[in-house]
Image (cartoon, rainbow, N blue to C red):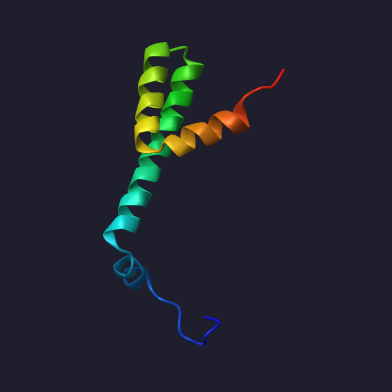
Amino acid sequence: RRAGQPERDLAAFVASRGPRDRWRDWRADKAAACYKKAGFAWSRRNWLGLGWYLGLTALASPKLVVQKFKTQSVRR
């Protein structure tokens, strides 16, 4: 828009993204979904489910697990 060109529509945006970008987005989305399920398992005290979903999260995005543990851990 700053260059005076019209805004791209959704189809043009999707077509402009390569397979690597789409793969990274898919992986990040799956990691976030698994982390959310791990939170629900934690609240139900389902320790096996917690371990399973945290493991899947770590496989999809190890960076997410480290980031979440750093920001959400309680320091005493």
Q: In this view, does 17 lie to the left or right of 6?
A: left
Q: Which residue is drawn at 39% across and 31% down?
A: 58
Q: Which residue is at the far right? A: 76
The x, y position of residue 21, in whole percent, is 34, 57
Q: In which quarter of the image is residue 41?
A: top left
Number of marks in picture:
0
Residue nearer the viewer, 48 or 66: 66
Q: Is residue 20 left or right of residue 32?
A: left
Location of the C terminus by quadrant is: top right
Q: Residue at x 27, y 58 (%)?
A: 19
Tell me: residue 12, above or below residue 55: below
Q: Residue at x 45, y 83 (%)?
A: 6
Q: In which quarter of the image is residue 35?
A: top left
Q: Which residue is at the far bottom? A: 4
The x, y position of residue 10, in whole percent, is 36, 68
Tell me: residue 48, above or below residue 28: above
The x, y position of residue 71, in whole percent, is 61, 33
The x, y position of residue 11, in whole percent, is 31, 70
